[in-house]
Image (cartoon, coloured by chain):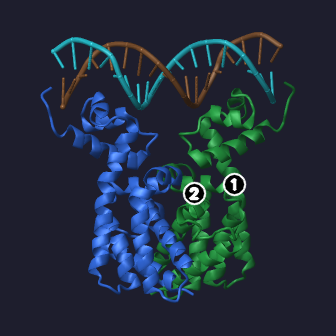
Chain colours: A green, B blue, C brown, D cyan
Amino acid sequence: MTPRQDTKLKILDSAEKLFGINGFETTSLRDITTAADVNLAAVNYHFQSKDSLIEAVIARRIEPVNERRMALLDAAGPEPTVEQILEAFLRPVFETQMEGAMPLVGRLLSNPVFFVDRMWEKHLAPVGKRFVEALVKALPHQPPAEVALRLYFSVGVMTHMLLWGPIFPRITGGMVDISDRQALLQRTVTFLAAGFRAL
Amino acid sequence: MTPRQDTKLKILDSAEKLFGINGFETTSLRDITTAADVNLAAVNYHFQSKDSLIEAVIARRIEPVNERRMALLDAAGPEPTVEQILEAFLRPVFETQMEGAMPLVGRLLSNPVFFVDRMWEKHLAPVGKRFVEALVKALPHQPPAEVALRLYFSVGVMTHMLLWGPIFPRITGGMVDISDRQALLQRTVTFLAAGFRAL
DNA sequence: GTCTATAACGGGATAGAC
DNA sequence: GTCTATCCCGTTATAGAC
């Protein structure tokens, strides 16, 4: 075949989708290359290994989300409210298509061993630190350790949304509607902000 | 070897531990039988397959937790508060050793495809329904759909605790202390109850 | 009920032609 | 850069002796 420069991209897209649906270990390189309609050996040509592949998949999505988080936090001014901080943290995630990349991120966040060992320092720690600082400032009556714990609670809520959101209609018989992404974000922020203010 | 009736139990214990630490796919039957100090073929003798093994592992732990949840909810009387309901839901989980079974449950809850297909109806739906009803009654000003969503938020917090709790000291540099299990339960209930009452 | 040995399969990775 | 063919390994599961 003649050279195609989009092969690398097609692999990334397929891998992201299939890893998100079926998990890293369960998804074979053959699954990925079949879905992407590329040759099996192309994976090891463009990426070196399956491990490197998933790292590339993750880096492509997390960095823009984190940059947007920082930008939104900056845009909220020098004294942002708890709601503004939480929205800056969550909006970039909710704005991403849940069917695509985000289930994968949820899945990875559910795997502390993998995540902490491989991407904690690079992708999560800096953002977390920045947001804890902002929240501590916005909540002068709360001990910093309590604020930090509650941000972890919030990450738990976010992760669970990423993973279970797409199947909520199925398991609640239509009772819980999450089709309005903007409304869901506001409902989440309302819930979490009240939790942060609890004494 | 002479018959040993504890082989089955040793397999269950090892499987529970290793699945929790390393995940289902990553853990081989050889890992399990080596750790349990039993023969490889014993797994397929006592359980039929790896799939049946994990179902046995799960059933052993989830049922007692759910029974205790129901009992605590009953014991709270006919008009329990939001705090009492949440504590009935969470206490049985927090009381279980986090190093043993619970990381596995957290891991499975992070895998909607697996969980919904195989244990939703049997292990989760009945309990969820009962607790949503109790919460709706305790929160007459909240729409039931909102209460249901917030219970899912709560499950997200719980799951995240199960998974990340054990490594909190490591990633926060000792800032967040969760060694006092009883205190952690109260802190979680306080946070969630405030969220449930938010308008 | 417990063991050894092995079957049957699928996986990641690579060599080498084009 | 792309392809085919293949290597090599670890896995689950089972057959059959004890």
Query: How far from the left and from the top, in percent, is residue B16?
Result: 33, 47
A147 vs A43: above or below? below
Of residue C17 and residue C2, the one placed in the foreground of this image is C2
Which residue: 49% across, 50% down?
A: B117
In-image side of A79 versus A191 (left or right):
right
Query: How far from the left and from the top, in percent, is residue A182?
Result: 70, 73
| Residue A127 visible in the shown view | yes
Query: How far from the left and from the top, in percent, is residue A78?
Result: 70, 83
Which residue: 43% across, 43% down?
A: B24
Mark 1 and 2 residues: CB-CB less than 8 Å, in contact? no
- Residue linked to disc 1: A61
Which residue type carries mark 2? Gly
Q: Quadrant of the N terminus of chain B?
A: top left
In-image side of A127 versus B75 (left or right):
right
Query: How far from the left and from the top, in percent, is residue B45?
Result: 28, 31
B18 vs D2: above or below? below
